[in-house]
Image (cartoon, coloured by chain):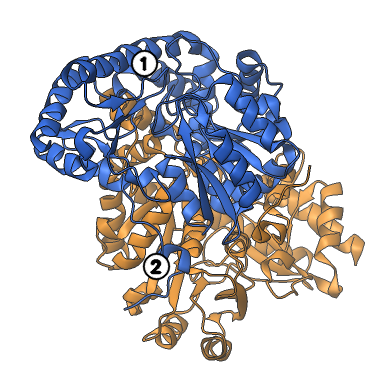
Chain colours: A orange, B blue
């Protein structure tokens, strides 16, 4: 039979991420295509002990229904870390726990977007955000990035021509480019938003993963009332627990909480408790430093191999995070590289789905967190062979 | 500053459930207001062992990102149970794991509803569903219930006058009434839907909790192509893990999966694995029978106390589930009973939010699963005193 689906889903772009997860699951393929943190760096011993503690101490509470906003001690921990790490005076009342930071994208769009409303995106912009926002049928305006962040003239033009409900940005180790906004550009963007009703959606999945182990000033610091920050434990503890959060002004958080309750009542309470127990009994900074050192080495190796083996290829040079973007030589089409790569057992992510207004056909995103150095070396040789073959 | 929220959230009814969770957390109040299963009946030893097994055997997989559809062995388990328990030949490909069955409500509405589309509800109808659907701005049509289910004439009129995208029903131990559709009524409803594009959304949170330990024929059996079933482990294992599912025809599940991925990528993978491990190493039927025996005693006690202490009050007599509905004597207002009840340390849920078209002001919903017999006896005496005082 034929079902009468809503307009939003009839026009939804077919997802590339699902396809990717399937590709990534073939163990003979070296995948630079996904966005997985290193499995080897998950502190399984620490999390096992934390789980055992929670399920021994007060298991009936951890396994029962809970409140929509999330486990208060965990929210207090997150708020305190904003204070100590970024100098932002957050309180637990400004934090809502979500199912990974992907849910922040969905619920935030849900409370802000009527069909046709304008949303500002980076160009290229994060695919998962485009997929989440698209279901609320907005009109996208894309602001091109340079090495310091969104280009100021284009950002100003967007603010003037298509007043956006919110601008979605990843100032720290942007996905997919791997670039980080400069401090000056953060201030410049913030000044253009100040005094308007536009919200800056500061996605900060990677802010703890700078190779120099230093934090960058958040846009929130310049325009606290106009900014929300989305955070996640997926990249620093474990993605399988699906625990993220939104840090937002109270009025936004109140609407967000209403949407969260309607969406799924509350996030997994057992894992909120396990995570909090883990954070209370382990040194998160040391754990993150171990991750950062490995990712830094893997990133440098990937960049060096491109420079050595294929100097005609341009690539970004990340200061942190998990991704870099490469521009293919000789106007090669990224889809050809993707499919030929799969035949040669190496997966990359074509850049097109990151461009809401088309383009990017000669770009690919590479992940350097999930494959170790040996696999990166082997995978890069396979990839370079594919590109040479197609050139 | 003033934020430019979407229309859907500006018009969202202020939630009563959040208020309830807060009230329920005061330990001096005996609460019949919430929808919590009995904490005492959660198999904490079994779940602790299962968690330890998962985090010892292959923790890195359980803590990593996973696929949107959910852990395949868990989906196979769920599908097989539909076969053995209800005689419905489900396959794993027809099952999508969600964050509790509340998320089924949100995502199903998301893929079906454009603003103004008609949705059919039971009258009274489940509050959590009303809250989830409302954010997609539908027009509700409510079909009154009698003891056998939705009244046939009203159901026929709805199908004729306001062709609904879907009808949301809880045939087994309906929430809030506690009534169960008769087999004849199920067939009658199904025949009215057959051949139309209307979907029957069969919410089956309580189908395992019949006091006679027998299952009822699902509406899905009569009109498989027009029916989706939402299920949940919250009432039979533990709600804090937030694991539910949708069982649906492939075309619906494909759109639902797109919405799920955009919403939060996938459900908590660690708990999916813990749950599957638990189910593989424990006898679920015996566990459910233990729960059912306790709920049956508690329900009967509640009914008997009403009959003995307050014969003027009418109440439903559930065959299972967790709730009954009472109609107050002397045209008492349920809100007065609610507020006066809180003062007397007993909480009930006023019926009004279950009526999308108004009414129900003299009804209250009572939960009999969470309080034990001693608390039910004490709470019922407090409640009867409140009603007498107000009469």
Label 1 crowding class (10 Å Cα cut-off): few <14, some 14-19, many 20+? few
Q: Chain of mark 1?
A: B
Horizontal placement of A65 versus B377: left or right? right
Q: Quadrant of the C terminus of chain B?
A: top left
Same-subunit check for callouts 2 and 1: no
Q: Are marks 2 and 1 in contact (CB under 8 Å)?
A: no
Q: Examine the rendered structure and indicate whether residue B31 appears above or below residue A1.
A: above
Real-space CA distance between mark 2 and mark 1, rounded to the nearest whole angstrom: 41 Å
Which image quadrant for residue A275? top left
* Residue plotted at (45% across, 9% down): B212
Asked if one can make out residue A293 in the rendered structure from this viewpoint, the answer is: no
Which image quadrant for residue A381? bottom right
Image position, residue B68 (x, y; %): 62, 42
Horizontal placement of B313 versus A169: left or right? left
Image position, residue B74 (x, y; %): 59, 26
Label 2 crowding class (10 Å Cα cut-off): few <14, some 14-19, many 20+? many
Write down the residue under mark 2.
Answer: A228
Q: Chain of mark 2?
A: A
* Residue plotted at (62% across, 32% down): B189
* Residue plotted at (42% across, 57% down): A231
Q: Examine the rendered structure and indicate whether residue A338 appears above or below residue B70.
A: below
Horizontal placement of B113 versus B210: left or right? right
Indicate the secondary structure of the residue bearing disc 2: strand
Write down the residue under mark 1.
Answer: B45
Indicate the secondary structure of the residue bearing disc 1: helix
Image position, residue B310 (x, y; %): 18, 22
Q: Quadrant of the N terminus of chain B?
A: bottom left
- Front residue of this view, candidates A130 and B82: B82
Image position, residue B155 (x, y; %): 58, 39
């Amino acid at each position: 039979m034929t079902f009468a689906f809503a307009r939003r889903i009839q026009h939804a772009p077919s997802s590339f991420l699902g396809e990717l997860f399937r590709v990534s699951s073939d163990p003979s393929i070296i995948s630079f295509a996904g966005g997985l943190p290193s499995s080897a760096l998950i502190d399984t011993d620490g999390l096992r002990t934390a789980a055992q503690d929670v399920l021994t101490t007060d298991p009936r509470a951890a396994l029962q229904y809970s409140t929509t906003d999330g486990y208060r001690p965990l929210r207090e921990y997150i708020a305190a870390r904003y204070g100590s790490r970024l100098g932002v005076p957050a309180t637990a009342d400004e934090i809502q726990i979500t199912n990974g930071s992907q849910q922040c994208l969905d619920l935030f769009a849900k409370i802000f977007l009527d069909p046709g409303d304008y949303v500002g995106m980076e160009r290229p912009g994060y695919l998962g955000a485009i997929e989440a926002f698209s279901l609320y049928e907005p009109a996208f305006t894309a602001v091109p990035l340079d090495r310091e962040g969104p280009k100021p003239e284009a950002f100003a033009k967007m603010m003037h021509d298509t007043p956006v409900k919110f601008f979605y940005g990843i100032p720290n180790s942007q996905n997919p480019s791997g670039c980080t906004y400069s401090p000056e550009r953060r201030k410049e963007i913030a000044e253009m938003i100040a005094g308007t009703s536009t919200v800056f959606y500061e996605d900060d999945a990677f802010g703890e993963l700078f190779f120099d182990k230093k934090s960058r000033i958040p846009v929130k610091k310049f325009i606290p009332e106009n900014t929300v920050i989305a955070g996640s434990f997926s990249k620093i503890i474990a993605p399988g627990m699906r625990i993220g959060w939104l840090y937002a002004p109270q009025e936004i958080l109140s609407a967000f909480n209403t949407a969260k309750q309607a969406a799924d009542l509350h996030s997994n309470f057992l894992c909120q408790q396990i995570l909090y127990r883990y954070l209370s009994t382990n040194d998160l900074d040391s754990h993150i430093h171990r991750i950062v050192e490995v990712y830094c080495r893997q990133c440098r190796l990937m960049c060096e191999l491109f420079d050595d083996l294929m100097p005609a290829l341009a690539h970004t040079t990340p200061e942190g995070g998990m991704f870099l973007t490469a521009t293919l030589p000789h106007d090669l089409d990224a889809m050809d590289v993707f499919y030929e790569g799969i035949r040669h057992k190496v997966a990359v992510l074509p850049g097109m789905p990151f461009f809401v207004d088309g383009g990017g056909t000669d770009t690919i995103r590479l992940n350097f967190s999930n494959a170790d150095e040996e696999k990166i070396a082997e995978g890069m040789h396979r990839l370079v062979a594919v590109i040479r073959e197609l050139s």
